[in-house]
Image: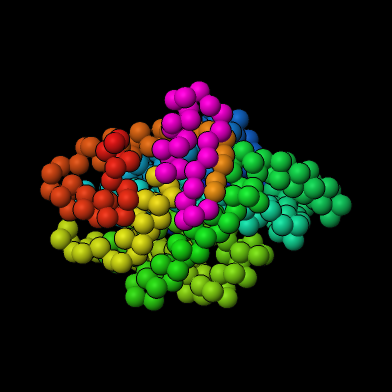
């Protein structure tokens, strides 16, 4: 039995819970005060922390997904077609490292969201103790999170790009989900769970939820479907099936925003700088460097380089058309 130590307000926790539900891997969901002890059992104290059946503790959602793939063969979330598998991984990486900024921005930039969400998150964490105690903790947590906004790039100056990107992503999803729920067939991949984890928070937070309900109602409803797909079997598309239009639309986001973001971050780190700036969708963006995101770029390049000629022949034209290929080829 696995134990997911997470939180309802954590996109990565919700991502892993939904994935475990779909894969029908027996697990317990532990959140709030009951999950805190697990944080001391991992090197980087961030949730979700998964306790394995052998009593070991692990975190970082993407490595967890692949480790579970190695341990459990049934109901894989990695498409068997290597080309599709790479695209799914690229979208999941984009979700984890860029789309998450929408959650931070919508949650912590405006007072109405800061107040409501800090109180809800305190309620989740404490599970009792009285309103005064809970709201006191909420104010401390609110101050901490707001103080971290510049670190993760979610400033008022950057938010126009983050918001424009979010609307483009949701517009493509809205058009897709009325046709079918999944990206690479009638069963979900790691890409759906990566996107779901981030959007799960937009579907709860006050301002973002209002936006989704008004402008992207079927994407909003889609979140509830992805949350528990344990009853879905489905099939993968054949390797020669054309990608759904949403794939090109989302890869255009990757090529226009995420790849320039990764390249600017990596270049700044190599130059010994502490911040970097870029322009995407005609909008400016500035952030402090992150070593982890340099590792993400290196990993994407390695995965692309490992593809055979057939897989490369299928997806490289699409990657070139959407502005992704040059960054993957390191040129």
- Which residue is most to the right? 132
- Which residue is most to the top? 272
User: With 114 as the anchor, is 47 left or right in this view?
Assistant: left
Looking at this view, is 175 or 278 the one in front? 278
The residue range painted magenta reads 260-283
Looking at this view, is 331 or 29 the one in front? 331
The residue at the point 23 percent across, 37 percent down is 305
Looking at this view, is 313 or 325 the one in front? 325
Whether the magenta-drawn stretch holds residue 185 is answered as no
The residue at the point 27 percent across, 51 percent down is 319
Q: Does residue 126 show up?
A: no
Q: Position of residue 173 (x, y in %)?
A: 42, 67
The residue at the point 44 percent across, 71 percent down is 174
Q: Count the marks.
A: 0
User: With 143 as the anchor, is 29 left or right in this view?
Assistant: left
* Snapshot colouring: rainbow
């Amino acid at each position: 039995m696995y134990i997911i130590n997470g939180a309802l307000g954590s996109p990565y926790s919700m991502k892993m819970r939904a994935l475990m539900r779909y894969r029908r891997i027996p697990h317990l969901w532990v959140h709030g005060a009951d999950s805190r002890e697990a944080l001391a059992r991992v090197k980087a104290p961030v949730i979700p922390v998964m306790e394995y059946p052998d009593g070991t503790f692990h975190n970082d959602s993407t490595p967890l997904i692949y480790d579970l793939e190695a341990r459990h063969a049934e109901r894989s979330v990695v498409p068997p077609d290597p080309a599709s598998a790479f695209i799914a991984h690229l979208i999941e990486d984009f979700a984890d490292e860029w789309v998450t900024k929408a959650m931070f921005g919508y949650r912590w930039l405006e007072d109405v969201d800061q107040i409501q969400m800090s109180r809800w998150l305190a309620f989740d964490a404490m599970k009792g103790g009285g309103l005064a105690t809970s709201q006191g903790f909420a104010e401390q947590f609110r101050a901490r999170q707001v103080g971290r906004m510049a670190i993760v790039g979610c400033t008022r100056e950057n938010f126009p790009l983050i918001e424009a990107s979010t609307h483009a992503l949701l517009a493509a999803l809205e058009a897709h989900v009325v046709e079918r729920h999944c990206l690479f067939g009638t069963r979900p991949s790691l890409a759906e769970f990566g996107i779901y984890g981030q959007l799960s928070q937009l579907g709860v937070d006050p301002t973002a939820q209002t936006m989704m309900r008004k402008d992207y109602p079927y994407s909003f409803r889609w979140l509830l479907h992805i949350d528990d797909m344990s009853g879905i079997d489905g099939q993968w598309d054949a390797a020669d099936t054309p990608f759904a239009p949403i794939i090109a639309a989302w890869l255009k986001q990757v090529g226009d925003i995420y790849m320039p973001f990764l390249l600017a971050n990596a270049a700044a780190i190599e130059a010994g700088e502490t911040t970097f700036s870029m322009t995407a969708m005609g909008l400016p963006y500035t952030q402090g460097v992150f070593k982890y995101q340099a590792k993400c770029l290196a990993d994407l390049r390695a995965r692309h380089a490992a593809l055979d000629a057939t897989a490369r022949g299928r997806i490289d034209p699409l990657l070139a058309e959407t502005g992704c290929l040059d960054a993957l080829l390191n040129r």
